[in-house]
Image (tube, rainbow, N blue to C red):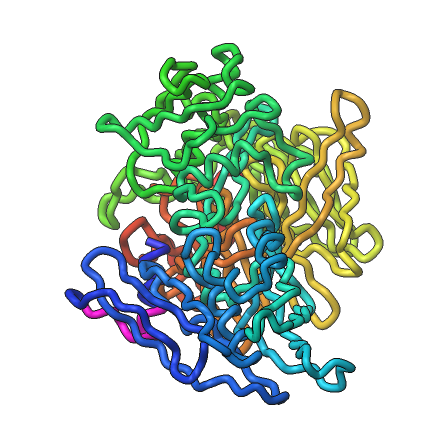
Amino acid sequence: MEDAERASAYAGRVGRAVPGDRVRGVRRAGAAGGRAVAALGAAGLLLSGCASMPDHGEIRRVDASQGVDSQVRVFGAPPADKASPADIVDGFLEAMTSDDPQLATARKYLTEDAAKDWRPGSAVTVLSAGLDRVRVEGEKDPDSPRWKVTGKKLATVDERSAYQPETGGKRYEEFLQLVQVNKQWRISTPPSSLVLSESDFQRIYKPVNKYYFSGGTLVADPVYVRQRSDPDSRMDPTTQTVQSLLDGPSKWLGPVVSTAFPSGTALREGTKSLSYDGQNTLRVPLNEKGSNVGQPQCQKMATQLLYTVRDLTASRLDRVELLRSDGKSSLCWVTGVAAASIAGRPAPPEHQYYVDKDSKLVRMVLNANADEQQQDKPEVAPGPLATAAGFKVGSAAIAYDEKRAAVVSDDGHGLYVVTLTTAGQMPQPLLTSKTGKLTPPSWDAQGDLWVADLDPQTQGLYRIPGGTGAPQKVDVAGLDGGRISALKASSDGVRIALLVEKEGGRKNLFIGRIERPEGKGDTSRLSVRELRPAAPQMAEVTAMSWAPRGRLLVVGRESGGVDQARYMLADGSMVAAGLPGATGLTAIAAADDESKPVVAFSGEDGIVWLPPGAQWRTVAAGGKAPVYPG
């Protein structure tokens, strides 16, 4: 679905291929550089014109791609005979966006030594638009022109395929030195990484999740792989993703997760493609390092693979089988049902909760395929909250087993944990904010409770271990003077989303890594580290929730835009899918189960639901603070 949406968006900006035409090479008008564009399947010809690039010193913009459809293959054109320095630079920048093996065409623009040593696959620099390039004036040797290429950095993708957004408008800048070889201009100092515009990056790469363990729970680790065969390794996307999984987690997530694969495990030498058989089984041959493990460990390895590959493809994957280094004998296998028990994911929620117009915590049964007429009416959540006279709920969080609720009083001053299984009296508050307010709380998969205090004297992030006992203030690195105005712990227990308000009242979303001390020692040393922007494209974020497959569902607006709700990957890159008609929402919640509806609060309509494949509908005219367990 994401690829289709991306392709549709690009189609509005480029000429479409004409079905039935022969595939032909297209040279850009007036320039030595160019690209041949081949459409997949019953495809045709795509024309993309461009003004010629002069070899004078003025700044010119090089748009390496004007939004080529993601189902179109692009091949660079080699340098023309006696091409000018400007044409060599432009042709090389174009050729970096091509799909040819080992980027062979791009290397033709380099000197022999530079072509041999160039390793662009180790990293990618993503720019928000095309490159600006200008000849550097005043060089001592005018016979060896030097060109400066610059652009606004959007993100980088490192050697582990992990995406890292850039903030603060940082600029990309590198110099390309040209020399003459046999009367032909060539580049002797190519860029240290692959440099792509945002549109080219989205055409060439796709986001996928690979999975690792934290305790007994699988954690999604988002990375980017090529949409088609990698030019260097010649691996198809599935094989690229599996190899990335075997290489280990991203640097950011690495400190809090582990892998079941023994050190040194890789695919059997020569493996370039992995495919399914008729029974939806994926067979993965490993090298010798991964071939000597016991069954329990092997099944954990297979579980990591099954979740990783199932996230990558639209087809149904029912079984993963690991093969020994001979490529034939079976090491172990795991089915989807068995993998689900190994993955340690929370059970699907039975209810959806919100605070009604009378400030009572209520819940609704999540009937399968329920329509508006069949939907059960909300009921007051059982336990002390149902009988506590005069107690008003402001916000709530429900434990994953739905046996306890954490509620903040309507005035925002007190945090209480109550049972949902037995009657009784309201307990004493676990945490009190004297002059400020407490944020809505959140449970994590470890059974701990999180909340932030907005009192200027005691403000900060607090954790209540197990939802009982004394609150512990948590050190959060990287707030830079901001205060936490909302939070949501992830279901995997290793990440926490923080809405941080800074001077001026603007709120931005960050994700922090929850680092827990090893062993059973001093748990007060738990901390949140390496805050990273989770929605850098948004000028302001107003609401957020964790969503299935390690994503975030974010309500906010881009600069100069209107409020919208979009899915974001946990690495801060935007997923194409957005929610229709999502203006006016001030709170939102998504379950870890994609079959459950998104629930939100609209100032005009109250509590609204968006079931999969349907439209928004009102389920309660009054109410606020919708939540799922978590």
Q: Quadrant of residue 138?
A: bottom right
Describe residue 588's horizontal placement relative to residue 523 as left or right: left
Q: Position of residue 181 (x, y in %)?
A: 59, 69
Furthest residue in direction front, as rendered: 182
Q: Where is residue 63 in the image (x, y as percent from the top left)?
A: 48, 75
Between residue 595 and residue 413, name the one nearer to us. Answer: 595
Between residue 119 and residue 512, name the one nearer to us. Answer: 119
Q: Position of residue 228 (x, y in %)?
A: 38, 50
Does residue 85 appear anywhere in the picture?
yes
Describe residue 129's horizontal placement relative to residue 375 as left or right: right
Does residue 440 appear anywhere in the picture?
no
* Picture residue at 67% right of the left edge, 56% below the top: 485
Furthest residue in direction top, as rendered: 294
Question: Magenta stretch: residue 16 in it?
Answer: yes
Q: Quadrant of residue 465?
A: top right
Between residue 106 and residue 475, name the one nearer to us. Answer: 106
Q: In which quarter of the image is residue 217?
A: top right
Q: Where is residue 477 in the image (x, y as percent from the top left)?
A: 77, 49
Q: Give the range drawn in magenta.
A: 10-18
* Picture residue at 22% right of the left edge, 48% below the top: 373
* Picture residue at 73% right of the left edge, 50% below the top: 453
Describe residue 284's horizontal placement relative to residue 428 as left or right: left
Q: Main secondary structure of the magenta part?
A: loop
* Picture residue at 50% right of the left edge, 13% below the top: 296
